[in-house]
Image: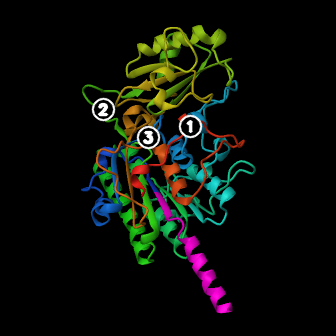
Amino acid sequence: MRLLLVVAAILVAGSAAAEHPHVYLVVVDGLDARLATPERMPRLFDLAVRDAERTSVFAAAHAVMPTDTNPNHVSLLTGVYPSAHGITGNLYWRRAPDAPAEKLDQAAFIEVETLFTVAEETSPELETAGVFAKPKLAQLFAGVPGRQRAPDVLWSPAQASPAGRDAATGYSFDSATIGALLAATADREPDLAVVNLADVDRTAHARGPDSEECSRAIAGADAAIGRLVDQLRALERWDRSVLIVAADHGFTSLSPSRERPYPVITFGRDLLRAGVTGVHVVADGGVEHVYADGVSADATDAGDAQERLAHVAEVARGAPGVAEVLARLPVPDVAMLASVHPDWHLVHQRSGDILLVAAPGHEFVDPFDPVFAGMLGNHGGPGEATVPLVVTGGDARLARAPAGTPAPNVVDVAPTIASLLGLRPTRRVDGSPVAPEESGRPIAAVLH
C-alpha cells in the first residue's frame, strides 16, 4: 500500500510538472527587423526548419513608442503599453524646478506588476530568472517592497568578470551574458527565464546598424541563442521548452549623407534663439519631450502655459529634421497625440506636454553632447518600431502560425507567457485591473 502511495505521488508530481512548459525569452537589444535574416542568424532560423511545425517567425512585429530599451522591455514583461506602465521613455522630467532630466530605470517607476511579480505573488513555486546585459534593466526588474517582486535569480553585469563586460558602457558581452544564464539554469530548470543581449545595440550605436561590426554582433547574438538551444537539448529539456526571441526596437543609421549632412537636432538652441523660456526639453533619440514650467503632472489642460507651448510648436515646425509636432494637452493649432497616434498609447503624465518626432535618420541631442552627437545609429522614433519575433521550441503546445497571421505587438508577449504558465493577467500595483485597450493579447496563432 505504501509503495502504491509513493508511486501515486510521483505520478502526481510528474503530472504537475507537465502542466506548463518552461519559457525562455531572449531579447536581442536593437535587432532591426531587416537585419534578422537566415544569413545573419543561421542558428535561430534553423529552428524554423528543424522544428517547423512548432515555429512561428514574425518578420515585422511591432514595438511600442518610443522605440527605446526601457519602455519596450517593460512592455515585454508586463503586457501593457506605456500609458499604463508609465515608462514613457528612457528619460523624463519630474516637473521640479531646476531639476535635470532623470532616467526611468528604477522598478519603483513601473505602475503595473511585472511577470516576475505575478509569478511570485500567485505561483511562488515557479522558478524565475532574469539575466540582463544592461545594468539599468537589472534595476528595472529588481524588487520593491510592497510593489514589485524580483525574479528568483537576478543577474547584472556587476557579476561578470572585467573581461566579460565593456568598460565604456558597463554592458556585459553576449558571450558572458548567455554564459551566466546557462550557469544559473544548469542545475535548476527555470519556469521562466528572461535574458537581454546588448552587443547589437551597443555596436549599432557606435558603428551604425549597417556596419561590419554590427553584422558580427548579430552573429554573436545568434551564437548565444544557439548555445541556449544546445544546452536545452543536452539536458533533455527541449521537448518541454518554449523559446521566444524578440527585439525591443530597431535602428536607424545616422551616417551623414548629401541629403542629410547633419543628423543632429539640438532644439533647445532653436528655442533660445526664438526667445522661448519656461520650458524643459528632454531628448530621447528619435523623440523629444517638451514640458512647460508650471504645468502639474496631473493637469488636464496647459492653463497659462498654452501660449508658450503654441510658440514651441511654431518653432519646431521650422526646425530642420523635425517631422511631427504633437500635443499631449490641448494646444491651439497643434494635433493631439491621442488622436493622431492612438496606437502609440503614450498619453501619460510623464510624457511631455509637447512631443516632437524626428525625421528618419535624425536624432535629438539636447543639450548638445559630442558623444551622443557622434553616434552612427540610434532609435526612439516610429521608423524603428518594426522588430523580429520568433516563437519556437519543442513543447507540444506550440503551433506554427498560419500564413497571413497579423504581426503581433511586443505587448502580446507577456500575455502569451502568462497563458503558457497559467498566470493571471498583470494588474496595476494598487490591485486594480488594466483596461483592455491598454493591454496586449496572447498570440493565439502560435498555441494549440
Task: Name the residue at 54% across, 34% down.
Answer: 437
Look at the image and say whether residue 21 sits in the magenta stretch.
Answer: yes
Amino acid type, label 1:
Pro
Residue at the (51%, 42%) spot, across then down: 440
The residue singled out by tag 3 in the image is 63
Instruction: Say if the magenta span includes residue 28.
Output: no
The kind of secondary structure element at disc 3 is loop
Q: Which residues are magenta?
A: 1-25
Where residue 151 appears, as percent x and y from the top left, is 62, 59
- Give the side of residue 152 with respect to residue 171, left or right: right
Where is 194 relative to 263, above or below?
below
Precedes in sequence: disc 3 or disc 2: 3
Neighbours of disc 1 within 10 Å: few (<14), some (14-19), many (20+): few
Q: Tell me if label 2 and label 1 are in contact, CB under 8 Å.
A: no
Q: How many marks?
A: 3
Which residue is labeled 2 in the image?
A: 256
Question: Is residue 203 at least partly visible in the picture?
Answer: yes
Which quarter of the image is occupied by the N terminus?
bottom right
151 vs 90: above or below: below
Front position in the image: 13 or 70: 13
The prevailing secondary structure element of the residues shown in magenta is: helix
Q: Quadrant of the C terminus?
A: bottom left
Q: Residue at x 57, y 49 (%)?
A: 136
Mark 3 closeness class: few <14, some 14–19, many ≥20 residues within 10 Å: many
Where residue 88 appears, as percent x and y from the top left, is 56, 34
